[in-house]
Amino acid sequence: MAAALKARELGVEKIIILERSETLGGILEQCIHTGFGLHYFKEELSGPEYAGRFIEQIRQSDIDVKTNTMVIDIDSDKVVTAVGPDEGLLKIQAKAIILAMGCRERPRGALSIPGHRPAGVMTAGTAQKYVNIDGYMPGRKIVILGSGDIGLIMARRMTLEGAEVKMVCELMPYSGGLARNIVQCLDDYGIPLKLSCTVVDIHGRERVEGVTIAKVDENLRPIKGTEEYVECDTLLLSVGLIPENELSKSAGIELNCITGGPDVDEMRETSQRGVFACGNVLQVHDLVDYVTLEAQIAAEGAAEYIKSGGTDEKKYAYAVHQEGVRYIVPQKINIASEKDVDLYFRVCRIYKNSKLIVKIDGETVISKKKPKLAPGEMETIKLKKDMLSKLKEDSIVEISVEESL
Amino acid sequence: MIYDVAVIGAGIIGALTARELARYKLNAVLIEKCNDVAMGTTKANSAIVHAGFDAAPGSNKAIFNVKGAELMPSVTAELGVPYSNNGSLVVAFSEDEMPELENLLKRGIENGVKELRILSAEELFELEPNISKQAVAALHAPTAGIVCPYEFAIAATENAVSNGIEFMRNCEVQAVEKAEDCSVLKTTQGDIKARVVVNAAGVFADDIARMFGDDGISIIARKGEYYLFDKAKGHVVFHTVFQCPTPMGKGVLVTPTVDGNLLIGPTALDIEDKNDTSTTYPGLMDVLNKAHKSVPEIINTRDVITAFSGLRAHSKTHDFIIGFSEKAPSLYNLAGIESPGLSAAPAIAVHAAEEIVKKLGISDLNESFNPVRERPIRFRYLDDEEMAELIKKDPRYGHIICRCETITEGEIVEAIHAPAGARDIDGVKRRTRAGMGRCQGGFCSSKVLEILSRELNIPYEEVTKAGGESRILFGRTK
Ligand SMILES: Cc1cc2nc3c(=O)[nH]c(=O)nc-3n(C[C@H](O)[C@H](O)[C@H](O)COP(=O)(O)OP(=O)(O)OC[C@H]3O[C@@H](n4cnc5c(N)ncnc54)[C@H](O)[C@@H]3O)c2cc1C
Ligand SMILES: Cc1cc2nc3c(=O)[nH]c(=O)nc-3n(C[C@H](O)[C@H](O)[C@H](O)COP(=O)(O)OP(=O)(O)OC[C@H]3O[C@@H](n4cnc5c(N)ncnc54)[C@H](O)[C@@H]3O)c2cc1C
C-alpha cells in the first residue's frame, strides 16, 4: 500500500494492488499488539491501526485493489497472472512491478527436530492467527522454540489468554528478537528465556504431551546429559522467517542466498529491469516503519522507470559485508545516484562497545562508535552525497564491525 | 447382517483387496481403526515399485513383486494415481561390490525381471550426472518406478466404496468370537459378522491372527527413517538410486518422488513398540551420511521439508504370508507384507480375491463394477483456459488455500466429500497436498480447519490433525 500510494503521488496513473487475502494489511492484521509506527507516525499504534491508516488513503485514491486474488505467475515480459473466486483468471501486462509478498515462517521440517509428529506443533504466526483472528486457543501449556519477535509476542499473548508459557528456548546464545520485546513480553511475565538450548525430542502420538530440551555446545550440537523433559501440550516455533520468493524465481529474478530476497540496487530494482521489491519479501524487517520507507523507495524507482522507459544504463558499485556483518541491502548502488543512500544491514552476533566501519575502495569513510549491536535489530547507515561521489563503476563499499578491546 | 467378507486394515493391501472383491457379487466391509485410510505403513515408505530382482527366486516376495510391478501401470491409470516409470539403479562404489551386482542381475533374470543390464560408470554418469564419481558400475532396471502410496490406497478405497464395499473408520478390531457360520469381530463400533475375514493389519497382523487362535505368525516392527527434501532438489537424481548391498548393510536410497520432491532413507532398526513412528537424531544423521555416498555435496539439511518414519512388518519367515490360515480356516492372512509389499500389492489383491471367492463359492460378477476412479481435479496442472473455465463454473476453484502447492478450496471440498473422504487435516493433506509444501501448512492449516469444520458441520475444536485426540484447538479465547 505504501508503494502504491507513493507511486500515485509521483504521477503513476494506472496502479493495481493484487492481494490474496480477503483484506489489505498483510501480517499487520494479526499483530494486535502495539509498537508500530513509532518512527513513521511518531505514535505507538497496533498493527491493524497502522495498516488502517494506509487502507484509508488507498480507499480515497483511485488505486485499483483486488483482494482475494492470488498471483500465480510473473513472466519475464511482466505479464502477471492471478486467480481469484471473483475475478477468475486475470492477466495483466505491467510496465513496472513492485514485489511486496512478505515472508513466511520457517516450519518444523526445516529444523528436523526428531520425535513424533502429533498435533500441537505449529508456528507462532499460525497460533497468532488462531488467537487474534479466529478467537481460539491452540494450547494451554506452551513451550516456545525460537526467540524471534513473533515467538516473544506470542509468549505474552498466550499468557494474557490464560495459558501457561513454560519457557522460550533459543538455540543461539542471544535472542533473535528486539530487546524491547524480551523485556515487555518475557521479563514482565516471568517467562524464562533459555539461551543455547533447543528441543531435541517431541513426545505424544496424537497431541503433544511434552518435549525434551537440551543445552547446545558452541557448534550448536545438543550436549549429552543436559536433557530435560518439559510437559506441555503445544510447541510453538518462532525460528525464522523466509522471504516469499517463489514468484520472483519464476520471473527469473536473482535471489540472494543470505537474505533469501532478490538482489537489488538503491532503488530496490531487482535483476529484472522494471521489477522492484520491498518489505519482507526483500529482507526480513523487524520494524514496519522501515518497510514503509523501503516501499516508498521502490515506488520512486518504479515511477522513474516508467517515465524513462528503463533505457538508461546503470553502472554499479557493490556493497560487500565484511567481518561481523551478515548482509547488506541494497547489494548494489548506481554510481549516478544523486540522493543519499541508506544501507540496511544486520550484524552476525552481539557486540558491545564496538565500531562500525564503512570503507569505499579501501578508504574509511565512516567510523561510528556503537555501544550495542545485535542481530535482532536491523542497523542502518547513511552514505551521503559526498561519499557517493567517490563511487566508480565496480567500486566496493564495505561495512565491518570492529571490536574495541 | 453377515458380510461375506470383512477386510481388516485399510492400508494398500486391504484397500486393493477390497477393490478386487468388489468385482464380485458379494457384501464386504473394509475396517480401519484409524480416522482414515493409509495411516499405517502405507503412508510412510520409500514408494518404490521395485523391479523384482531383490527377493529369493520362488518366494512369494519374488513372484508377487514381479507380477505387481507388471500390473502397476494399468492399475494406477485406472485409479488415477500418480505413477512414474523412472527406472532404478543399484550402484556399486568399488570393484569389491561387483560380484554382488552380478548376483542381483542373475537373480533378477531368474525372477523374470525384464530389461536388466549392468551399466559402465560412463553410462551411469550420463544418466545421472550427480552420482558420486566413486561409482564403478550400476545395475539398471528400466521397469522399476515410483508411485504415491497413500494416494494409491485412498484411490483404491474410493473405488471400492463406489463399487459397493462398505468402509468403516475408527473401527478397531479388539477380539474375535466364533459363531456357527461366521466370525464375530468385536470392534470399537460394535460387532461385525463375516464369513471370511481378511487380515491385512500390517504390523498388527500377528495380533489379529492370535485373536483367531492362529499363533503361527510373528511380526517384528522394523523402523525406517527418511528425510524429504524441497522440490528444488527434485532433480538431483532421475532414477531411484540404491546402493549395492554390502556386508555392512543395505545402504540407503536416493529417489525422486512422483510429486517432484527428493526422498532419502531408510534406516532399519527393530523396535518393540509397534506404534512408535518417531524419528530420531541418530537415525536421521545416518540417513544423511549414507546418502552422501551416492550424491555427495548435493544434499544438505537446509532443503529438508520434513522427516518421517515407517514400520516394516517383518515376519520371522522372511516372506509374505498369503493364504487361508491353517488354524482358523475362515481367516485369510495377508501378513508379513514388508517391502516389496507396495509393489506386490496389485498382484496380491487379485490372488487373494480369487482364493476368497472360491472358498465362498461365489462366482457371479458384480456387473456394475467400474474399475475407473477419476483423478480429482488438480488446479495447478490446468492451463489458463481450463483454469478460467473451472473458476467460472465453481468460484471455489479460484480460492487458493495452500500457496506453496497451489491447492484450491474446490479441491479440498472435493476431497472431503469423496467416497471415504477426508475427515481431518492430514487426510486433506494426503488427498490434495494442501500443507505438504515448503511451509508445511503454516499458512493453510487454519484455513483447512475452517473448511473441514464447515463441510463436516462440526465445531472448530473438534477438527483434528489425524483423528483421536489430535485436536488443534482448545476452545475460545477469553
Ligand atoms: C508477529 C509480528 C510482530 C511484529 N511486530 C512489530 C512491531 O511491534 N513493530 C513494528 O514496527 N514491526 C513489527 N513487525 C514487522 C512488520 O510489521 C512487518 O515486517 C511488516 O508489516 C511486513 O510488511 P510486508 O508488506 O513486507 O509483508 P506482509 O505484511 O507479509 O504483506 C505481504 C502481503 O502480500 C500478500 N501476498 C503474498 N504473496 C502473494 C501473491 N502471490 N499474490 C497476492 N498477494 C500475495 C500477502 O497475503 C500479504 O498480505 C512484526 C511482524 C510480525 C510478523
Ligand atoms: C521403511 C519402509 C520402506 C518401504 N519401502 C517400500 C518400497 O519402496 N516399495 C515397496 O513395494 N514396499 C515398500 N515397503 C513396504 C510397504 O510399505 C508395505 O508392504 C505396505 O505398505 C504394507 O501395506 P499394508 O496394507 O499391509 O499395511 P499398513 O499400511 O500398515 O495397513 C495396515 C492397516 O491395518 C490397520 N489395523 C491394524 N490393526 C487393526 C485393528 N485391530 N483393527 C482395525 N484396523 C487395524 C492399521 O491402522 C493400518 O491402517 C516399505 C516399508 C517400510 C516400512
Image: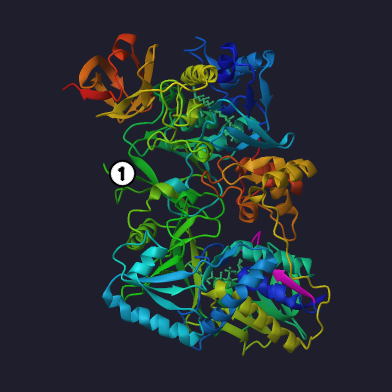
**Residue B35 falls within the magenta-colored stretch:** yes
Which amino acid does the dot numbered 1 rest on? Leu
Q: Horizontal placement of A371 versus A207: left or right?
A: left
Q: In which quarter of the view is residue B148 placed?
A: bottom right
Residue B461 shows in the view? no
Q: Residues within 10 Å of mark 1 (few under 14, many from 20)?
A: some
Q: Horizontal placement of A395 versus B281: left or right?
A: left
Main secondary structure type of the part rendered in magenta = loop
Q: Position of residue B176 (x, y in %)?
A: 68, 77
Asked whether B381 or B32 is in front, the reply is B381
Q: Horizontal placement of A125 versus A271: left or right?
A: right
Q: Regarding ligand 2, which quadrant of the image does it lie in? A: bottom right
A80 is higher (above) or lower (below) than B4: above
Q: Position of residue B21 (x, y in %)?
A: 73, 77
**Residue B351 falls within the magenta-colored stretch:** no
Tell me where the magenta segment starts and ends, as one range: B27-39
Disc 1 target residue: A220
